Amino acid sequence: MMRPIRMNEIPSKDRDSMKRTILGTSFVALISAGAAMADTAVLTTYADIAAAKYGDSTATAKVLGTAVDALIADPTEASLAAARSAWVAARVPYQQTEVYRFGNAIVDDWEGKVNAWPLDEGLIDYVDPSYGGTTDENPLAVANVIANPTLTVNGVEIDATNITPEFLAETLHEADEVEANVATGYHAIEFLLWGQDLNGTKAGAGARPASDFAANDACTGGNCARRADFLRAATDLLISDLMWMTSQWGEGGAAREAVLENEAVGLSAMLTGMGSLSYGETAGERMRLGLMLNDPEEEHDCFSDNTHNSHFYNGLGVQNVYLGSYTRIDGTVISGASLSGLVAAKDGDLDAEMQEKLGATMMALGAIKDAAEGGFAYDMMLEAGNAEGEALIMGGVNGFVDQTKSIERVVGALGLDGIAVEGSDSLDNPNAVFE
Amino acid sequence: MFRSLVLSVVVMLSIVAQAAAQDVDLSTRVTAAVEQHILPRYARFATSARALSRAAFSNCNADDAELRRTYHAAFDDWVRVSHLRFGPSETDNRAFALAFWPDTRGKTPKALAGLIADESPAGLAAAELMQHSIAAQGFYALDYLLYDPTYMTMGVPEYRCELIRSLSEGIAVRAEEINGDWGQYFAAQMMAPSKAGAYHTSNEAAGELLKAVATGLQFTEEARLARPLGTFDRPRPKRAEAWRSGRSQLHVVLSLQATRELTTVLAGTTSVGERMDDAFETVLNNATFDDPVFAGVAEPIARLKVESLQQYVNALREQVVAEMTVALDVSIGFNALDGD
């Protein structure tokens, strides 16, 4: 949602120079304002947890890759169900990484490849007639590349005969400069595994049959081989993109180095990520806006109906960055010097407040997750006039908004007043909603 | 990200501001802004929004001259307050329901087509429609029904008629609610800050008002201008605001006029106030070229004027924030025109 001018619309050269100049100036201001110098150990823990989270994301994506291979080799309802389970499992560590996104430019610049959302899925494959056609915004909204080996993008004919990772990443993704043209990442894969969720605000996820990947006459939905190519290519890309990011957080990796380079900047990155993911991104764009639109298409994981988990693990990611402790998918714990400890040393009450707020958010997100798993699907919560659903979702929104205020106090307590938390139209009152 | 970095400069400047603090009676300035800028504008909006609803009830044909006249008048008055996104405009998502734009995924046409195709009861009564998706409410939805040939003829005329009436009444109700809340309590909270109210100090209240100016200018630059501009190779004239009713450029002008007034009222009769007034004057002089819906973005020469205006607005925002934070000794804090 609000996607006014995003970083990727600014030529990267300008962006980088702008960043350097501006940051350079603000560092001076920070230091002159008496910024606290942090214990490097806190930043090391932060980087270690990032490496573990991206490592877990890579490992679970590889499991997904194996399941996708099995599905394509033998498309049955069982192999499709296994691939879907693998996708859901892969989201658990990845959603916890999102807290690294906003404060770290290297993550933010890369993230669009793996988690771009929302998407105009008609670009990729067949859609229901109720989906509509092209829009003012996107002439490719129903281009259906799986059915069409040739596309016309802004008057230019594009050869889509071979659906390869390169084609998806370099040609189709964000084609015609439209961000809703998502051809790579978790949500493109999600659409291929589930199909559109046509249940509106009723329970139920997408119901793509396994035969959409079948060979010869058994093929449903047409062009099954191209659909399988797309799924395979998108999954391969996801794995390679996650591997790349994991290495950035390893010893000597660029992301780790950037965090460790300057203590005030490293702490700012941590808090900016916590605040921006809490406030602008999750509470605003992903939760409150969907509620105001009563629109299940606004669900973050709308094809799979996995949205309750997405929000839950976003919240958990924020909490574990603050506490400096992450439980890996194999159950081992990565922990060390924490932001919490740093704050406690300065202001015990504030640390207690921050921990309490983070805990309250997790309770609220847990209530959404429990309700969804108990049969009250996130779609149903979004229905116009569904007071119980609205109360559940707003509980999560309020938790995130509330904890953002405490994050701002932490920023102040650590003398890092120069950082800014990215906000949201749907929370913070600028002049309009950007979707 | 980009925004947050720019804002870190803002914060930096506010640190400088503290050093250069001037003697300003912020309480007086805030009171002047509320009494001279906010209250009259919301009162006027409430009146013109009610007139729109009355016109729709008396004649709901999309091409009725009186309906269209009142529509434009009410929309003008909304744009004149659209920078004031705090307090009563945010209660119950009122401003979102009045103005859901930009609509980057075409939610509004889809929602309207759904209502009309199903002849949904939700469109037949304002109270029902006001519970519905914000995409199917407010001025930008009405713009389709009054000016888009597809929606002007979609479904049955009787249903469209009731939908136009419901939309107009929803606009009127929300305008009156916002205006009422300002009069009943929010003006007092701003003018007489207290620990129990929304603002603890006049400094916080003045910061809110300056943030409204900065955010209003930023929205004009990033949405009203940058969206139709797109890139040189891919201009996007159909992303201009309310192009169907020919209002795109008008919104830029109205919003500049409104933020100018708020800025100068906040500055008072000072040298800063004069500089602000001159700066707005210059930008407004560059905003009145003949291109009402920014169709020119697709032509190299005409495009330059829109690009140039965008640069003027950007520079204006930077100047206003830099000078006014110092003059008032306030911080505008975290702005929210970011998200994803």
Image (spheres, rainbow, N blue to C red):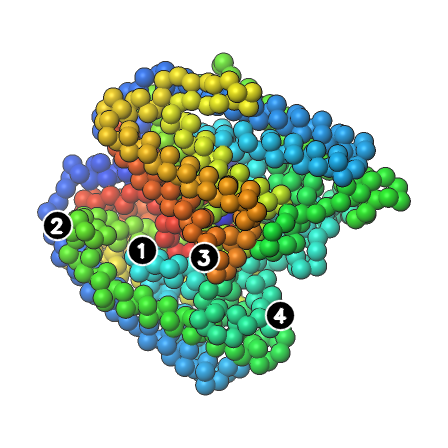
First in sequence, mark 2 or 4: give its number: 2
Q: Secondary structure at mark 3?
A: helix
Chain of the residue displaying label 2: B
Q: Residues within 10 Å of mark 2 (few under 14, many from 20)?
A: few
Q: Secondary structure at mark 1?
A: loop
Q: Residue furthest top?
A: A251
Q: Residues within 10 Å of mark 4 (few under 14, many from 20)?
A: few
Q: Residues within 10 Å of mark 1 (few under 14, many from 20)?
A: some
Q: Calculate the distance from the C-alpha at mark 3 to the C-alpha at mark 4.
A: 24 Å
Q: Amino acid at mark 4?
A: Asp
> In screen coordinates, is A237 left or right of B277?
right
Residue drawn 55% across the image and 31% down it: A92
Residue drawn 21% across the image and 51% down it: B199
Q: Which residue is mark 3?
A: A387
Q: Which residue is mark 2?
A: B24
Q: Amino acid at mark 3?
A: Ala
**In this view, B121 is above or below B111:** below
Q: Residue furthest front?
A: A374
